[in-house]
Amino acid sequence: MMNSARFDPEWGAACQMRSQIYGWFSTVFAGEMAPAAMASCQEGGADHLWAVFTALGLGRQAEAVAAVFKAWAAHPEAPLENAADFAALFLLEGRAAPLPYASHYLDGGGPLYGAPARAMRAFLASSPWRLDERFKEPEDHLAVILGVLAQWSRDCGRVGDVAACAAQQEAYLDAALMPWVEQWQARMDAVDTLAFRYYPAVAALLVAFLHVDREYLQACAEGE
């Protein structure tokens, strides 16, 4: 499947698409969605990603997100209501809240800036990637973890040792996301007071994609 001896154009193309996908997920959970971005989605601005998700066997999850785009069109106040959904999910504190921080789940619902944030801070310090200075959140915020994957995927598309790069990204997923992301999604699904199910739908799509991508990385790491 992948040849790790030289630059592999198939790996390169996959990395560029993975970078786009992770970048999109990161943007969704980084902050409230602007009205212009919502309009773009309703006008087909994300259709190229939807085609990829469908090809990966994630059509059902992608369609659930697309259904929200159609629901937005019927509600003139959709931008305000969607912003309120974001705040209700991610900005209100509580041990059972679906806060997008690894520390919230791996440190027993304790305070932010826990061990996962410190580990992520050390990882970033030793890496070529940097946070956007305008993003004032702990380093273990979901958007940060996904943003690193977006940058990493973009940069590793032309590496010669595909197996090593894939193994490193697989290990990153296993350490930074997989231990807690399904618990986060389950908490979000349990919130029944949202005007729209946009964020739960995107979360379900993200979790499904993570499993597919991890299998892909594992296969590449094994030289298949």
Image: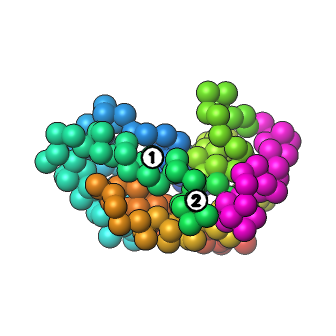
- Which residues make up the magenta segment? 103-128
Residue under label 1, please give it. 87
Residue at mark 2 to residue at mark 1: CA–CA distance? 13 Å
- Left or right: residue 150 versus residue 195 is right
Percent of width and height locating residue 223: 71, 69
Residue under label 2, please give it. 94
- Left or right: residue 71 versus residue 58 is left
Q: Which quadrant of the structure image shows residue 137?
A: top right
Residue reaching furthest to the front: 94
- Left or right: residue 221 versus residue 37 is right
- Residue type (three-letter) at the residue carrying disc 2: Gly
User: Compared to 32, does 169 lie above or below?
Assistant: below
Q: Which quadrant of the structure image shows residue 44?
A: top left
- Magenta span includes 173: no
Q: How many marks?
A: 2
- Residue type (three-letter) at the residue carrying disc 1: Ala
Q: Residue at x 72, y 34 (%)?
A: 130
Q: Residue at x 84, y 39 (%)?
A: 125
- Magenta span includes 120: yes
User: Compared to 75, does 168 lie above or below?
Assistant: below
Percent of width and height locating residue 149: 64, 49
**Camera sees residue 114:** yes
Q: Which quadrant of the structure image shows residue 83?
A: top left
Toward the viewer: 223 or 132? Answer: 132
Percent of width and height locating residue 155: 67, 41
